[in-house]
């Protein structure tokens, strides 16, 4: 298991967040000001089979079709974040999944500020190291995320050179 100082998490900016450049920029600033580092990122447009694979754990739940529809409705941005206790820190910055709850319990979190509904809640984050490894393999199949600081720094500089920040909406 990776140490807290060199942990990774997957963050996804959902399509409606990318369509709003003001919100998108604000979330970027929140990440940077939190001390988390963006290791790598890319924009993707999920196909229905890819979205179904990613959200297979939710299959059969009442919101599943709506979630698949959202995640295939436009480009999304997938990031790997690094930092101390990064999984918990990213999840705290996102706030509760349910936007209505977020508005009252954590009014300064991403989902409270930029979420529209429980499905269109602006962002996704891995909930464990195992989830990160599974999710990252789907989006970054040829990239390894090392568990030492030097490798993380190396990935960060390479990731920024490779980033694809098309703002097509």
Image (spheres, rainbow, N blue to C red):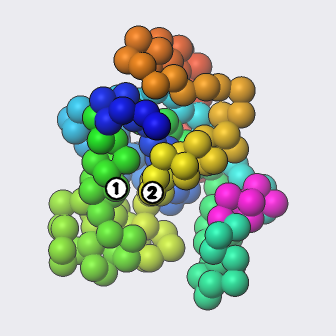
Find disc 1 in the rendering and name its residue: 91
* Distance (Cα) linking label 2 and label 1: 8 Å
What is the crowding at mark 1: few (fewer than 14 residues within 10 Å), some, or many (at least 20)? many
Q: Farthest bottom residue?
A: 62
Residue 123, picture quadrant = bottom left
Percent x, y for residue 45? 69, 48
Percent x, y for residue 33? 21, 35
The answer to whether residue 98 is above or below residue 145 is: below
From the viewer's perspective, tell me whether residue 1 is left or right of residue 112.
right
What is the crowding at mark 2: few (fewer than 14 residues within 10 Å), some, or many (at least 20)? some
Q: Nearer the viewer, residue 79 or 148?
A: 148
Q: Are marks 2 and 1 in contact (CB under 8 Å)?
A: yes
Residue 127: mark? 2
Q: Residue at x 71, y 33 (%)?
A: 141
Q: Residue at x 64, y 26 (%)?
A: 143
From the viewer's perspective, tell me whether residue 3 is left or right of residue 52.
left
Q: Nearer the viewer, residue 14 or 59?
A: 59
Residue 84, picture quadrant = top left
Identify the magenta region: 49-55
Q: Farthest front residue?
A: 1
Q: Residue at x 42, y 19 (%)?
A: 148
Give the SS element for disc 1: helix
Mark 2 or mark 1, which has the lower sequence index?
A: 1
Percent x, y for residue 167? 55, 39
From the viewer's perspective, tell me whether residue 49 is left or right of residue 156.
right
> Which secondary structure is most common in the magenta stretch?
helix
Residue 102, picture quadrant = bottom left
Can residue 29 be seen?
no
The answer to whether residue 130 is above or below residue 55 is: above
Residue 69: mark? none
């Amino acid at each position: 298991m990776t140490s807290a100082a060199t942990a990774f998490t997957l963050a996804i900016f959902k399509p409606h967040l990318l369509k709003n450049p003001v919100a998108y920029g604000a979330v970027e600033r929140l990440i940077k000001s939190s001390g988390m580092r963006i290791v790598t990122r890319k924009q993707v447009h999920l196909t229905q089979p890819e979205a179904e694979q990613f959200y297979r754990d939710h299959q059969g739940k009442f919101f599943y079709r709506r979630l698949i529809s959202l995640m295939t409705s436009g480009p999304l941005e997938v990031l790997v974040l690094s930092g101390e206790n990064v999984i918990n820190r990213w999840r705290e910055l996102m706030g509760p999944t349910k936007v209505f709850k977020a508005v009252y319990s954590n009014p300064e979190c991403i989902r409270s500020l930029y979420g529209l509904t429980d499905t269109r809640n602006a962002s996704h984050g891995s909930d464990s190291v195992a989830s990160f490894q599974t999710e990252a393999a789907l989006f970054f199949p040829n990239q390894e995320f090392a568990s030492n600081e030097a490798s993380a720094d190396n990935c960060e500089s390479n990731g920024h050179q490779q980033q694809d920040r098309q703002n097509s909406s």
